[in-house]
Amino acid sequence: MKVSLPSRLSVLFFVFSFLSLLLAGRLYFLQIVHGEEFSERADRQYIRPVSTSFNRGSIFFENRDGTHPGAATLKSGFTVAINPNLLPDPQKVYERLSSTLTLDSENFFARAGKKDDPYEEIARRVDEATAERINALGITGLSTFHEKWRFYPRATLAAHAIGFVAYKGDTLSGQYGLERYYDDVLRRDGGDIYINFFAEIFSGIKKNIVEKKPGEGDIVTTIEPSVQTFLEDKLREIDTQWSPEEIGGIIINPQNGEIYAMAGYPTFDPNNFQGEKDISLFRNPLIENVYEMGSIIKPLTIAVAIDAGVITATTTYEDRGFLVLNNAKISNYDGKARGVVDMQEVLNQSLNTGAAFAALRMGKETFTKYMKNFHLGDETGIDLPNESYGLTKNFNNPRDVELATAAYGQGVAFTPIATVRALSALGNGGTLIDPHIVKKIEYRTGLSKTITSLPGERVIKKSTSDEITRMLVNVVDKALLGGVVKLPHYSIAAKTGTAQIAKSGGGGYDETRFLHSFFGYFPAYKPQFLVFLFAINPLGARYASETLTRPFMDTTKFLINYYEIPPDR
């Protein structure tokens, strides 16, 4: 069977078109996608034995207007090195260099004396203008080499969330925060030896070139830098006024889990982390530490009791100021009796006996089932490393006294992020969210992946969420500092917490040390923000209402103004 000429031409045209598309695609990846990378390789000089320069994806904040300022980027400069064997007169070289570069004389002459070593670095991270002046000196045995290093433009801002890059053995990699969690995304081709192609051809030098798999892309966070800055400023104010051992805060969207700000104090500068002697400073307390949260757990207890149908906001009990359970006495924070009070007053006056009453009326099985549904003892799955589990053993304890104390947040301990997830369900209609700190991954191929939050597990009914929100708004309007912080045109749902801190060696609680906590969300009936604050053992104040109410209200007012939130009442 003969093939006609037009058919042959069609086949040839198809093959030619296919090959052209392949070639165009290859050129696109070489020139556009990887053009900068290959350009950088071409700029490097093969005579440098080991490169201290590296490439890595960037981390970005996200401004309210959608722009992306840098959180972790790369900075360029130059390394100055000598070949001691070729250096003519170290003394004269030192004198000539000293007019351009600040040098430690002892270090310089020690390196210049290593005649068997062809490469000794005498300065790093030198700016381009200085490098040009050094090259202009024309000194034999003196060279400059381009280098890059990790740079954090906002210094301490969101340091616990961002983390930093450091050596692990001989490899630079992310060690904390997003740098570690997304290390596989941020890594780039980390080849240690750069070779000038033409120099290699004409010199006859043979080297093995290993092509390393590049990283994938850059990441855009949910952190809004102005919000983060405001939160950190508030934490510093709390530190100045009350001198706590540790402070922390989270600002989150309780509808979708996006974290606008996360901060712990004291903090550190990831540009200069090497100077820190206490490496525990790098831990993110909002993710890695667990605390007995105290009375901010009471709204969860009241909510699940309402959801279970065993109480309403108007259910009453007789408060004698204390309860005796399993031969153990538990009391209100002040030990005083209130007589017959309802569940609204349990929240308004933060009565331990009232929270215990609600839990005991539910019974151990029902209370435990609800609390476990909030996953307070589990990891939230947040995209940060080293998340801890909560200490929830007392939920399973058969004794009534453990049930009662767990109902007001003692004897059980949770991470702040797990606590925030559970509390968000009170305001968002009753579902768990997925807390996350990365919004988008922008891959090197030009594609991107947006992180979305799927509808979460329902833990309480929407009607319960509405009712507990109404009760918490009542707390702010009438009880919190006597109602003086109420905003007439905005509904705010909030609760304070003051918890005793367990003795470090075990055996009960320290009567002189307390953890203060505070959470609130707004606009209350369709909240866009939930703010959580805590402080460990602030000095000069017994209760969280004294230390954290003003910082919370300041933060609330800032967010309302910054995001131009319309009044809801």
Image: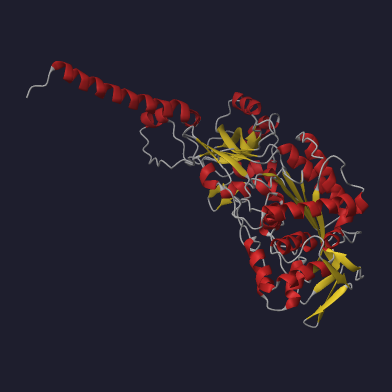
Task: Return the residue found at the far top.
Answer: 6
Residue 90 figure quarter: top right
Counting from the top left corner in percent of width and height, residue 434 is at: 61, 50
Task: Return the residue found at the far left.
Answer: 1
Left or right of 317? Residue 445 is left
Q: As rendered, which of 147 and 122 lies closer to the eye?
A: 147
Left or right of 227? Residue 346 is right
Is residue 282 visible in the rendered image? The answer is no
State whether residue 290 is above or below residue 133: below
Q: As rendered, which of 273 and 94 lies closer to the eye?
A: 273
Counting from the top left corner in percent of width and height, residue 449 is at: 52, 39
The quadrant of the image that shows the N terminus is top left
Q: As rendered, which of 496 and 538 lies closer to the eye?
A: 496
Residue 88 figure quarter: top right
Residue depicted at 64% across the width and 67% down the height: 369
Q: As rendered, which of 178 and 11 lies closer to the eye?
A: 11
State whether residue 245 is above or below residue 443: below
Left or right of 117? Residue 62 is right
Please say which color scheme the image uses. secondary structure
Residue depicted at 61% across the width and 52% down the height: 382
The quadrant of the image that shows the C terminus is top right
Is residue 229 visible in the rendered image? The answer is yes
- Give the number of marks: 0
Counting from the top left corner in percent of width and height, residue 301 is at: 74, 63
State whether residue 431 is above or below residue 102: below
Task: Return the residue found at the far bottom.
Answer: 327
Counting from the top left corner in percent of width and height, residue 427 is at: 72, 50
Residue depicted at 71% across the width and 70% down the height: 362
